[in-house]
């Protein structure tokens, strides 16, 4: 397919937005490098961002600069950043207005430590059907708080049964259920896991005293009939790389790498997915100091524009789930 026949989306947690601006208002060199050399050349139609720590400051100066870079010569990218909430690192979302020409202001979900940036938009070819798009960052410090956040998110996915469609992505801060995953769950009972506070943040203590990874979001989405496109691509196209880990590569005493950065889509929209790539950012110096590399990889989804049209108009069969949690 040609670029005009595709819609490209990406989610990326850029740790603390690469740091604050210089006194003259110049963003950090690492931030500029990432937007100009990593994101802009790929001509994304939607960018789901997490840890936009400095993007809402100074009258959203950096948010507007990012939209300018991502828009490229067409200059048609628009960005939003959600309220900070209890945390310090808000979420954000950028949409290309030639692809998604109509968008309502963000829908505020209130129980979150870091509220998602949730926008109701439209695909240019199907202006009559709402498309909910959400960029999230699950609470890093509260397993039960995340459960409440994900239940709040279900208010957005509920719109699908009334004719809307849904695409969401972000740092889930918890894990997919184990079935079908090539990366095993962390053994939280292993003595090699020495960061016990991290274990408390990512696992639930069982009645027998053992610890089990948090998987609430994935279970909720599967129970509700929604899909993770990484699984879809691995199954439909035989691309096992789609299930590569996205974070935890640098963790010391926290277990091994895991797939905590994920997309989810409704059962019609998932049929439009053509490809998914985990973009290795392990060499990206997100602080500009040479001392620390990026702690998250990015996840890119490539979609058929024609397929999205058919999905929004319900001209395709909804994709059944690949497996049952009860199996």
Image (cartoon, rainbow, N blue to C red):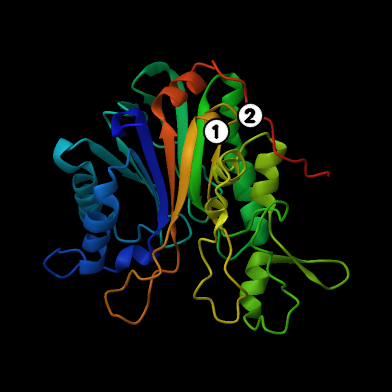
Residue 49's spot in the image, x, y percent? Answer: 39, 51
Q: At x 65% / y 84%, what residue is drawn?
A: 194
Instruction: Note whether 70 is above or below 100 in the view shown.
Output: below
Q: Which mark is residue 248?
A: none
Q: At x 55% / y 34%, what residue is drawn?
A: 156
Place residue 57 in its image quadrant.
bottom left
The image quadrant where one finds the N terminus is top left
Q: Secondary structure at mark 1?
A: helix
Q: Left or right: where does residue 188 sit relative to residue 247?
A: right
Residue 157's spot in the image, x, y percent? Answer: 58, 33
Q: Which residue is mark 2?
A: 319
Q: Which mark is residue 270?
A: 1
Q: At x 21% / y 41%, what residue is drawn?
A: 71
Instruction: Note whether 102 is above or below 228 in the view shown.
Output: above
Place residue 162 in its image quadrant.
top right
Residue 246's spot in the image, x, y percent? Answer: 51, 61
Q: Left or right: where does residue 319 sit relative to residue 280?
A: right
Asked if marks 2 and 1 touch (Cβ < 8 Å), the reply is: yes
């Amino acid at each position: 397919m040609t670029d005009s026949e595709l819609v490209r989306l990406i989610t990326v947690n850029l740790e603390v937005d690469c740091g604050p601006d210089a006194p003259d208002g110049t963003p950090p060199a690492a931030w500029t490098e990432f937007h100009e050399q990593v994101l802009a050349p790929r001509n994304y139609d939607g960018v789901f961002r997490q840890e936009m720590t400095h993007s809402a400051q100074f009258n959203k100066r950096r948010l507007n600069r990012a939209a300018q870079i991502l828009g490229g010569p067409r200059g048609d990218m628009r960005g939003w950043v959600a309220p900070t909430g209890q945390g310090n690192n808000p979420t954000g979302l950028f949409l290309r207005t030639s692809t998604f020409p109509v968008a309502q202001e963000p829908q505020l979900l209130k129980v979150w430590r870091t509220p998602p940036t949730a926008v109701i938009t439209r695909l240019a070819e199907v202006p009559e059907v709402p498309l909910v798009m959400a960029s999230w960052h699950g609470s890093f410090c509260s397993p039960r708080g995340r459960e409440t956040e994900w239940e709040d998110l279900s208010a957005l996915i509920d719109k699908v049964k009334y004719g809307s469609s849904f695409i969401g992505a972000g740092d889930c801060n918890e894990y997919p259920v184990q079935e079908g995953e090539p990366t095993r769950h962390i053994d939280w009972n292993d003595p090699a896991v020495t960061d016990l506070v991290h274990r408390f943040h990512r696992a639930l203590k069982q009645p027998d005293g053992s610890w089990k990874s948090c998987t609430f979001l994935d279970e909720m989405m599967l129970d509700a009939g929604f899909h993770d496109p990484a699984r879809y691509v691995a199954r439909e196209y035989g691309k096992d790389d789609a299930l590569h880990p996205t974070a935890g590569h640098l963790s010391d005493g926290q277990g091994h790498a895991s797939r905590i950065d994920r997309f989810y889509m409704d059962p019609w929209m998932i049929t439009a997915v053509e490809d998914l790539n985990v973009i290795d950012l392990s060499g990206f110096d997100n602080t500009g100091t040479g001392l620390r590399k990026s702690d998250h990889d990015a996840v890119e989804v490539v979609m058929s524009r024609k397929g999205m049209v058919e999905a929004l108009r319900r001209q395709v069969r909804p994709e059944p789930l690949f497996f049952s949690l009860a199996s």
